[in-house]
């Protein structure tokens, strides 16, 4: 085992191969071992007459003048059977038998032949036996005159070798025969060092002294320099480095500046007009004159005119249909000169010419009703693709392949939704496929041009015959096509032909400098407004990108990875929908303004009439509150509106049977972009409102009113632990919710991610289709909103039906605790508005043993005690919750008590400043507890007197009355009619005489000072935050996590500020917080 392990460790994991698998000229390629191998003898050379796909020799043969003796006369191998089975046989033996007799070797390498003939004729002559022991004809060398002193400008006259057999059929001798005038014989003395082929007029010729070869064009001939020349009246055109040259006797109308190609290079993240680069293209230089001439001077389809017109059209396509390009101008001139007849009655498809451009208006083309097939969501669109190569040769008409638009997808780069089903173009099913492409992979690929057709299965086309198909042309919109003025604004003109990548037009004398590829492709299918189950012609939108090749080809050949996107879009015209929606948006905006004004009026009734005399009519705090009310009114109204309208789209799109509606295109040019803007506005406005609400909740006046009396007359103090418990419970309740955020988050995560229900928002008209696909923003908002609302609603419903009935509710439990502790609670959320929880129990003492408390509770249960409710005229029996409207006299008195201290004011002020700045700092000075106790006692006594109205207050402003509201007044929260502050003495006197009013708080509005009272606002914020994060990041799990973290941050801020506020307003030492 150790021996094998050591052997494997010494093995190399990689193998070496030459660049592009091209072996040196003196080696052949051994396909069994994938290696280049030298012949095993100096008398052997690679057999270049038999090569593989890379141009490498497959085996060895004997060198010229060496006789091959690889078998006996019977054709039997000379190797032993054991050698053949072991693979050690070397049956090819090369000898010098012919050289000793001054003979040459026959063409098959098996016979010795003489270099003379026993008989000759005028068509033959005797070859010469050369120093290399081969027969050769005495042909003139390149660039020299022939033996007949012919001029170099005339056609070449040479001879080729011919092998003559004897009577037995074996080669006997070789002779020379004349080739036709203008043809050549390629021998080794014509080759340059290191070349296998001889090149003339762009054609590669192999060495063969037995064959006469022609020039590529029928009007060419070899001259005495062994180069191809055109005859009189013909011009040589084409680039020999790009292919075979041609002789033309007719030059096209436009014959200058035809090789210039302009590119607009751009980074991946910017627009396509960033940088302009012009090159001289060898492809255009080689092809244009020939193809333009043959197309312009059309001599019939059999004379290659039709193919040349296709090639000329392809050159125009390579120029991105630029009207200033010579190739496009030439094509348009030929188009104008052609007779008016066309193919299939199509405008712009003239005889003998390819159909390059749609001549119809954009509106007529996009609203064409020529496709008669009826569609359903179970049917798929069928497409045909016609392919042409660069030279204009037709490559066939076939079904559109499933991976056609993923032409350059690297392994493992395709998205999950790249499957056969996602590319079957099912009607109504939108898809997005994103690939990464290494441009080095398409540098050597063949470029093709395509015409796209959709199959009309209704067979309603003219001239239809059973067994055929009706094809409807698919218009092509090149997103970065150039127009006459070069501005790139002509993006609505449709064309016919397109390509996926261009690796030919960017070739120069330096090689391939620029490559162009289809960066973005979108197939758009529109639903007819008059017949929802029928479609307008599909349209293909292509956006090309150009990249220079030097950084990644010359820089090491590692390639360049780019992103490619293919999208299918099924949409409908929503102009009528948005005409109706504009009316609704106006009504909703008006409703938001009305609600805002109504809430401002209510706030003014609570605050404005109680301003101290001389204070400005409008302060910064007033503007702050007005803005807050406006933000909240906007969110309430528009969130409801957006949820209603998006739910309409979700229900009618996802649950439709026959084709009824399709979603509009998801881009900036349709009205749905309004929703995206609204999502951003709602989130940020609501976030601002909640932040302000947290700050306001953290500044309310919270004061516990202790009704407990000392048991012993000798002392005036009572136990403080009841206050500690009540205050800590209120501190905990500040962030208490009606729903559990952790449970809601996990349930939403489970449903949207675990159950893949986030894919219910894909643009597929089938609610049960949970395949990956493009997410529609409207459907996503509906999906997210209803899952949050349903989960939260079920929790609140469960609490109302089960928890609050089987167990004591959260609010009731807190009031019971305060009642048992005999501590009422005063809460002022505004200067003259607040709430009062009357928790004075009928028990003698709260600071009692368990047995005493149980006994008192039993007495209360049996009716042996007084009612828990407030003892006041008009107060409902047993009611403990009240909404409070106080007078300015009451507020001034309360504020004065907070400011007073029987210690010196400087010490108290120093304590307050220190206390507010660092409430949890352990090295601070001890707070003046005794002074706080005295302050608390004074405020507590004042509030007890105010609640009990004993003794009867002398000032009307300190008197209280209890009033009740009607059902309507309770719902809208009406404000009592106080006198206005007009500024004169009489008005101020009337104001000071206003009484404090208690309203029954049946709806527990006092919870608006904690999270429990803004539960709906918090849920709306969760929805908006989740939706916006999903728009930005496209990840449901990340969006849910960020939503949870944003709430926890808000919860932390509320708890922190609220704790500081309680400590300050309740005069409570924060060291007793639990």
Image: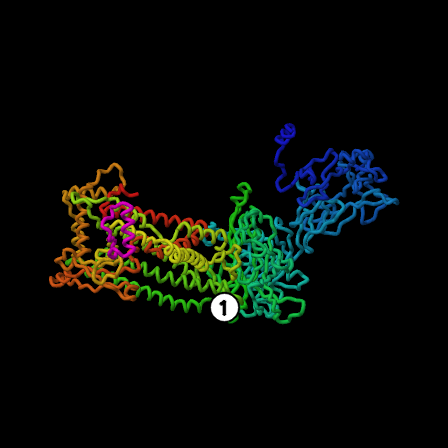
Image quarter of residue 668: bottom left
Badge 1: how crowded within 10 Å, few (<14), some, or many (20+)?
few
Residue occupying the far left of the picture: 985
Residue occupying the far right of the picture: 167
Residue 296 or 600: which is nearer the viewer? Answer: 600
The answer to whether any part of residue 261 appears in the image is no
User: Residue shown at 48%/56% (left/top)?
Assistant: 775
The answer to whether residue 1029 is above or below residue 525 is: above
User: In the rendered image, which quarter contains the N terminus?
Assistant: top right
Image quarter of residue 189: top right
The answer to whether residue 911 is above or below residue 857 is: above
Q: Which range of residues does the magenta coloring cover?
A: 838-867
> Would you say 493 lies left or right of 1011 here?
right
Assign a secondary structure to mark 1: helix
Residue 709 or 148: which is nearer the viewer? Answer: 709
User: Circle 1 is placed at which residue position?
Assistant: 363
Asked if residue 844 is among those painted magenta in the image, a careful observer would answer yes
Picture coordinates of residue 549, whole percent (x, y): 53, 46
User: Residue shown at 22%/38% (left/top)?
Assistant: 926
The answer to whether residue 577 is above or below residue 761 is: below
């Amino acid at each position: 085992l150790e021996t094998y392990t050591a052997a494997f460790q010494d093995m190399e994991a990689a193998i070496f191969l030459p660049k592009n698998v091209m072996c040196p000229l003196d080696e052949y390629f051994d396909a069994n071992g994938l290696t280049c191998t030298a012949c095993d003898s100096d008398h052997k050379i690679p057999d270049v007459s038999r090569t593989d796909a890379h141009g490498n020799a497959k085996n060895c043969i004997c060198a010229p003048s060496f006789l091959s003796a690889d078998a006996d006369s019977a054709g039997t191998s000379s190797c032993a059977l054991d050698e053949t089975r072991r693979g050690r046989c070397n049956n090819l033996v090369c000898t010098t038998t012919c050289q000793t007799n001054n003979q040459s070797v026959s063409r098959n390498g098996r016979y010795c032949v003489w270099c003379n003939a026993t008989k000759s004729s005028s068509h033959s002559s005797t070859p010469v036996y050369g120093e290399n022991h081969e027969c050769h004809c005495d042909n003139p060398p390149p660039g020299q005159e022939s033996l007949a002193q012919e001029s170099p400008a005339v056609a070449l006259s040479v001879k080729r070798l011919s092998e003559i057999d004897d009577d037995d059929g074996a080669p006997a001798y070789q002779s020379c025969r004349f080739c036709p005038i203008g043809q050549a014989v390629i021998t080794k003395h014509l080759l340059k060092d290191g070349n296998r082929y001889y090149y003339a007029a762009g054609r590669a010729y192999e060495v063969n002294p037995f064959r006469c070869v022609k020039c590529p064009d029928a009007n060419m001939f070899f001259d005495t320099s062994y180069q191809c020349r055109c005859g009189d009246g013909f011009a040589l055109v084409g680039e020999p480095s790009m292919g075979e040259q041609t002789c033309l006797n007719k030059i096209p109308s436009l014959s200058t500046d035809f090789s210039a190609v302009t590119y607009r290079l751009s980074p991946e993240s910017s627009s396509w007009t960033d940088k302009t680069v012009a090159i001289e293209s060898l492809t255009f230089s080689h092809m244009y004159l020939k193809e333009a001439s043959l197309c312009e001077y059309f001599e019939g389809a059999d004379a290659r005119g039709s193919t040349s017109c296709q090639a000329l059209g392809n050159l125009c396509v390579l120029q991105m249909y630029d009207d200033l390009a010579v190739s496009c101008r030439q094509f348009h001139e030929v188009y104008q000169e052609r007779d008016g007849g066309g193919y299939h009655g199509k405008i712009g498809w003239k005889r003998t010419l390819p159909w390059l451009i749609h001549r119809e208006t954009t509106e007529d083309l996009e609203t064409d009703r020529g496709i008669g097939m009826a569609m359903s969501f179970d049917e798929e669109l069928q497409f045909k693709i016609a392919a042409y190569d660069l030279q204009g040769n037709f490559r066939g008409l076939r079904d559109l392949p499933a991976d056609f638009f993923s032409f350059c997808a690297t392994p493992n780069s395709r998205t999950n939704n790249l499957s056969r089903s996602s590319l079957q173009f099912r009607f109504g099913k939108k898809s997005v496929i994103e690939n990464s492409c290494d441009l080095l992979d398409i540098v050597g690929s063949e470029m093709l041009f395509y015409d796209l057709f959709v199959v009309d299965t209704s067979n309603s086309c003219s001239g239809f015959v059973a067994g055929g198909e009706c094809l409807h042309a698919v218009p092509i919109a090149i997103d970065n096509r150039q127009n006459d003025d070069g501005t790139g604004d002509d993006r609505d003109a449709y064309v016919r032909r397109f390509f996926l990548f261009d690796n030919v037009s960017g070739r120069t004398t330096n090689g391939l400098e620029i490559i162009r590829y289809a960066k973005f492709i979108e197939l758009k299918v529109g639903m007819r407004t008059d017949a929802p189950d029928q479609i307008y012609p599909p349209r293909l939108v292509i956006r090309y990108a150009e990249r220079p090749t030097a950084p990644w080809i010359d820089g090491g050949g590692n390639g360049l990875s780019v992103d490619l996107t293919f999208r299918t879009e099924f949409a409908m015209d929503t102009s009528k929908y948005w005409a109706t929606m504009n009316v609704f948006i106006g009504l909703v905006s008006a409703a938001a303004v009305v609600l805002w004004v109504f809430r401002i009026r209510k706030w003014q009734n609570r605050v404005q009439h109680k301003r101290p005399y001389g204070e400005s009519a409008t302060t910064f705090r007033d503007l702050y509150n007005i803005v807050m009310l406006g933000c909240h009114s906007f969110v309430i109204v528009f969130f409801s509106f957006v949820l209603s309208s998006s739910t309409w789209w979700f229900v009618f799109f996802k649950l439709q049977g026959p084709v009824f509606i399709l979603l509009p295109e998801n881009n900036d040019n349709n009205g749905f972009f309004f929703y995206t803007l609204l999502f951003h506005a709602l989130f940020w406005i609501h976030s601002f409102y909640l932040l302000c609400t947290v700050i306001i909740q953290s500044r309310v006046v919270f004061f516990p009113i202790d009704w407990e009396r000392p048991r012993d007359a000798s002392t005036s103090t009572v136990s403080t632990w009841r206050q500690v418990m009540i205050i800590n419970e209120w501190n905990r309740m500040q962030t208490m919710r009606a729903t559990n955020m952790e449970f809601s988050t996990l349930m939403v995560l489970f449903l949207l991610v675990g159950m893949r229900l986030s894919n219910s928002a894909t643009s597929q008209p089938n609610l049960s289709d949970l395949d990956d696909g493009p997410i529609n923003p409207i459907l996503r908002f509906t999906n997210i909103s209803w899952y949050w609302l349903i989960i939260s609603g079920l929790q609140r419903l469960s609490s109302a039906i089960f928890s609050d009935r089987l167990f004591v509710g959260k609010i009731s439990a807190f009031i019971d605790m305060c009642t048992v502790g005999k501590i009422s609670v005063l809460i002022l959320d505004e200067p003259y508005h607040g709430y009062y929880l009357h928790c004075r129990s009928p028990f003698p003492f709260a600071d009692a043993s368990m047995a005493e408390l149980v006994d008192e509770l039993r007495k209360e249960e049996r009716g042996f005690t007084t009612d828990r409710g407030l003892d006041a005229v008009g107060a409902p029996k047993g009611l403990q919750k009240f909404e409070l409207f106080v007078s300015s006299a009451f507020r001034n008195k309360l504020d004065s008590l907070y400011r007073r201290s029987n210690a010196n004011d400087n010490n108290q002020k120093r304590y307050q400043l220190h206390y507010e700045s660092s409430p949890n700092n352990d090295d601070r000075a001890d707070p003046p507890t005794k002074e706080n106790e005295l302050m608390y006692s004074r405020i507590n006594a004042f509030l007890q007197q105010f609640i009990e109205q004993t003794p009867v207050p002398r000032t009307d402003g300190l008197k209280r009355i209890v009033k009740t509201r009607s059902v309507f007044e309770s719902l809208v929260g009406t404000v009592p009619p106080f006198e206005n502050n007009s500024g004169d003495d009489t008005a101020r006197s009337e104001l000071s005489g206003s009484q404090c009013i208690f309203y029954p708080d049946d709806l527990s509005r006092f919870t608006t000072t904690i999270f429990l009272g803004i539960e709906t606002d918090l849920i709306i914020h969760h929805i908006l935050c989740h939706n916006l994060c999903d728009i930005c990041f496209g990840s449901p799990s990340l969006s849910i996590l960020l939503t949870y973290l944003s709430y926890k941050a808000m919860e932390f801020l509320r708890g922190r500020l609220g704790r500081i506020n309680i400590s300050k307003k309740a005069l409570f030492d924060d060291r007793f917080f639990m």
